[in-house]
Amino acid sequence: MSEYLILRHRAIPGLERLPVYLEHQGFAAFKKAVMELPPAQVIQMVKDSGLRGRGGAGFPTGLKWSFLPNDLWPHYVVANADESEPGTFKDREIMESNPFQFLEGLMIAAYAVQANVAYIYIRGEYWHIARWLDQKIAELEQAGLLGERLFGTDYSLRIYTHLGAGAYICGEETALLESLEGKLGQPRLRPPFPATAGLYNRPTVVNNVETLANVPLIVLNGPAWYHNYGTDKSPGTKVFSLSGCVNRPGNYELPFGVTFRELIFEHGGGVPEGRTLKAVMTAGASSVLIPMDESVLDTPMDYESLNKFGGSLGSASVIVLDDSVNMAWLTQKTVNFFKHESCGKCTPCREGTYWMNRLAERIVRGKAGLREVELLYQVARQMQGKCLCALGEFSTLAVVSSIDRFRADFEAVVTKEPIYG
Amino acid sequence: MNTLRAKYADEIQAILAKYPPEHKRSAVMPLLYLAQREAGYVTVQAMAEIAEILEISITDVASIVGFYTLYYDQPHGRYHIQVCTDLPCALRGAEDFLKALCQALGVEVGQVTPDGLFVIEEVKCIGACHRAPVFQVQGDGEIVFHENQTLETALAVIEALRQKAQQEKEGTA
Ligand SMILES: Cc1cc2nc3c(=O)[nH]c(=O)nc-3n(C[C@H](O)[C@H](O)[C@H](O)COP(=O)(O)O)c2cc1C
Ligand code: SF4
Ligand code: FES
């Protein structure tokens, strides 16, 4: 890709330093918003841009901001930097290498909903990034870009980082808010949604890091400009985290609508050692397996096109699987992850992930037969639609799709070759 | 006496200042990190002190420690060598890497080395899948990533930590 909107540091060396960021129109958008634009107009710009949330669900960002009621205060904005989906490492690169663009986006979001305090909830493993952002925030305060009565107006803003401590579920926005309140990270029943009853029961916007990093450019260049990138319904670019059986794993920023073929072969250099592509997961471990053939390879990657495979783009964490991968093994890996990460609040997920994990382990150890494969399938099917939050549903996706689409792999392990002896 | 409060008055003030005064419970996670940095794990006394600072029950604090995997309530080896074997890393050889590392150190996953310094753990994705094999070292109040590892580089990292600990013991650090 010749043009970066988000990973701009790859084209502009030193962008992680404030003077360099300022030289490249840094904080011009925030300053313009605070000094010239009424909050409602900022929200309208983001609505018109068509920006959709990059945290997984693709929800329209401007619309989300417009939901906050104006008769209940204070409002809060929380950046979701929990990034824990297996195969996802994009927010990390943004925060490490283009931190000010993310912070500016967060600041514009806060101004748009008139929040005076914003938090960044960062996964505990990104401890070094939290410290790094703390330094950046201090620099902004010193430079008068953050703090009280900004640019001579009435608007004040503070940003604080808050470290998680190793719980994938805290990426789910209501669990994240519970965690930020000092409680167990367990999802809340919805409604009410965070927009009306979020942090401390106050109206709250929760947005992903990458989503926020888009905002400065939209405010600076206008919503029409943003539609130059991507597709009609999914405008802009996306940072794809490419991992697994691929020669050049890494982050790739590409316009929505790029095909699997372009991402995996042109950018990722194809699968290693002349093996053949077997399947792809597009939303990390929370994905259905999409079997790959020549025609599927030309599918555009956006929020709509993957529906026909029962899949979704999610966080665009693309895990590539070649013909050396046995899908029974893969299933065991994913259910083990979800069993580990289930928060235990609701029974179908707590019990279901436990049993799926036990069954899958017995299967890959050669201690089970086709009956257990069938049982595993049934447990997953029974969980579907019954869990309190999406994690429960996510845990079933690889199970059901791999048994449906790669049954031979399961037959091979139970009748011939166990994977772990 | 509240030793945490006595020893870290300023740092605790700075933590509390991040949250509205009527919601100071929000400070429980950063305070637990502070306590863990102090003792290597969260002691029962530290939980009581944090409960006192935040005006919540000790049970509330203990349940937080139990829920989140990065907190420890037992002494457990000074450095946690946490190898990611989650799916994307496993596709790039992480399981073999873990096995080789355990063999070289003569321990099983979860077992502390005889010198009490290291424990090898298996963890889920840490956001470095494109640089597998990877591990993080949790210890001394920090978490440090080590990416694109081989057995040799990993052993060198461990040896450097061992020497650091040795020098501290001899008072030459
Ligand atoms: C189990 C689970 C884990 C999630 N993890 C994350 C995450 O790590 N980062 C993130 O931004 N969103 C995550 N989400 C989505 C959030 O709930 C929320 O939709 C998102 O932060 C909204 O931001 P966006 O509109 O900018 O995408 C997760 C959702 C679920 C159900
Ligand atoms: S579905 Fe799983 S993670 Fe979600 S609330 Fe229920 S137990 Fe917790
Ligand atoms: S799977 Fe190991 S770091 Fe992501």
Image (tube, rainbow, N blue to C red):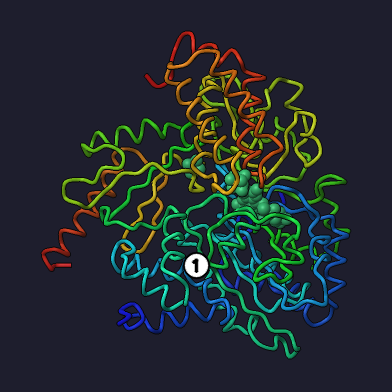
Using the rendered view, name the quadrant where residue A38 is placed: bottom right
Residue toward you, B131 or B72: B72
**Which residue is most to the left?**
B170
Q: At 46% across and 65% down in the image, what residue appears?
A: B60
**Which amino acid, by three-letter code, is at mark 1?**
Trp
The answer to whether one can see residue B47 in this image is yes
Q: x, y percentage for residue B131?
A: 47, 42
Task: Sort mark 1 into few (<14), some (14-19) or many (20+) by Cα contacts within 10 Å.
Answer: some
Q: x, y percentage for residue A277?
A: 61, 22
Q: At 78% across and 40% down in the image, what residue appears?
A: A257
Q: Horizontally, is A394 left or right of A220 in the view? A: left
Using the rendered view, name the quadrant where residue B173 is placed: bottom left
- Image: B92 above or below A49: above
Q: Residue beneath label 1, please?
A: A132
Q: At 86% across and 46% down in the image, what residue appears?
A: A233
Q: Quadrant of the N terminus of chain B?
A: bottom left
> Which chain is home to disc 1?
A
Q: x, y percentage for residue A305?
A: 80, 35
Q: Horizontally, is B114 left or right of A273 in the view? A: left
Mark 1: is the Cβ under 8 angstroms from ligand 1?
no
**Which residue is most to the top?**
A415
Residue toward you, A399 or A5: A399
